[in-house]
Image: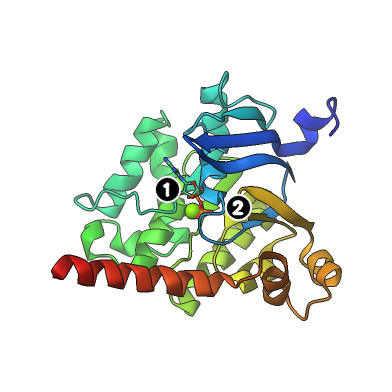
Amino acid sequence: MGTTDTGDRLAIRAKNLTKKFNGLTAVDNINLEVVKGEIFAFLGPNGAGKSTTIRMLTTLLQPTNGEIRINGFDPIKEQDKVRKSFGIVFQDPSLDDELTAYENMELHGILYNIPKELRLRRIEELLKMVELWERRNDFIKTFSGGMKRRLEIARGLLHHPSIFFLDEPTLGLDPQTRNQIWNYIFDLNQKEGITVFFTTHYIEEAERIAERIAIIDHGRIIARGTPEDLIIKTNASSLENAFLILTGHTIREEIANNIDQMRMRRRMMQR
Ligand code: ADP
Ligand code: MG
């Protein structure tokens, strides 16, 4: 890993990054390099360490070990500069249900100290982009899952970040809405050169949109490269198939298992 050009060329750099929770090593000595302007997919089964990695990259969690640079800044020593650099859509819903779409945007703009005039202009532009301008005065609790996700995307972009983190932004959405969301993100990348770092359970999304991929399993990166690289390396017929060969299971099985587990837990609680 170079030490001189990294500040300029790389949006994200993680070196020997590790996170331990008591006895569990959730992220185990990983290295990541994401070039500015790139669309990068971070794939792995449930519990592999994706969200933990994102939380460390975005100042929300302190690493046990290792070094991070976000646009050349250190998330531990230069939190403010790092926080201005990125926008994020969290895995779990994070909107205020009791506020309107517009109020959610306003709140974020105020938290980020965006001057009023710029804030109003940008909110309008982004709500129009995600096709929610007409619904701006409606309460979040009346929104569908897809509308909420679109609003979270608009909110994450309000302060003009140069890096956009999306942690499973399309989980549970119908194919048409998923498509629409990736179209916005792809457009942003093409028009504004925003760096995109995302996770997803839908491998075909990564295959379609990601320039480079890293696959994490049990906290370790087990493969990386372009979608084509991974397919060729594993002699697979598709990226989905390559993932299966590399990790020993499909991402979907994991979801099914999780849903089964939830049902079982609910049944036990009802007894
Ligand atoms: P992924 O996002 O890939 O599904 P996570 O990063 O959420 O995986 O979790 C990785 C592992 O770390 C899991 O085993 C999870 O249970 C564990 N973990 C995550 N957060 C915590 C925490 N705050 N305390 C203890 N264990 C955690
Ligand atoms: Mg996660």
Q: Residue at x 79, y 36 (%)?
A: 9
Quarter of the picture containing the N terminus is: top right
Query: What residue occupies the far left of the structure in this picture?
Result: 271
Q: Residue at x 72, y 66 (%)?
A: 246
Q: Nearer the viewer, mark 2 or mark 1?
A: 2
Can you tell which quarter of the image residue 133 is in? Answer: bottom left
Type of amino acid at the residue the image marks with label 2: His
Residue placed under numbered mark 1 in the picture: 155
Q: Nearer the viewer, residue 15 or 134?
A: 15
Q: Nearer the viewer, residue 129 or 217?
A: 217
Residue placed under numbered mark 2 in the picture: 218
Q: Is residue 101 above or below residue 88?
A: below
Query: What residue occupies the far bottom of the structure in this picture?
Result: 237
Q: Position of residue 76 (x, y in %)?
A: 56, 22
Position of 46 with respect to 235 (left or right) is: left
Residue 97 appears anywhere in the view: yes
Q: Secondary structure at mark 2?
A: loop
Check mark 1 vs ligand 2: CB closer than 8 Å? yes or no. no
Residue 157 appears anywhere in the view: no
Position of 183 with respect to 105 (left or right) is: right
Can you tell which quarter of the image residue 34 is in? Answer: top right
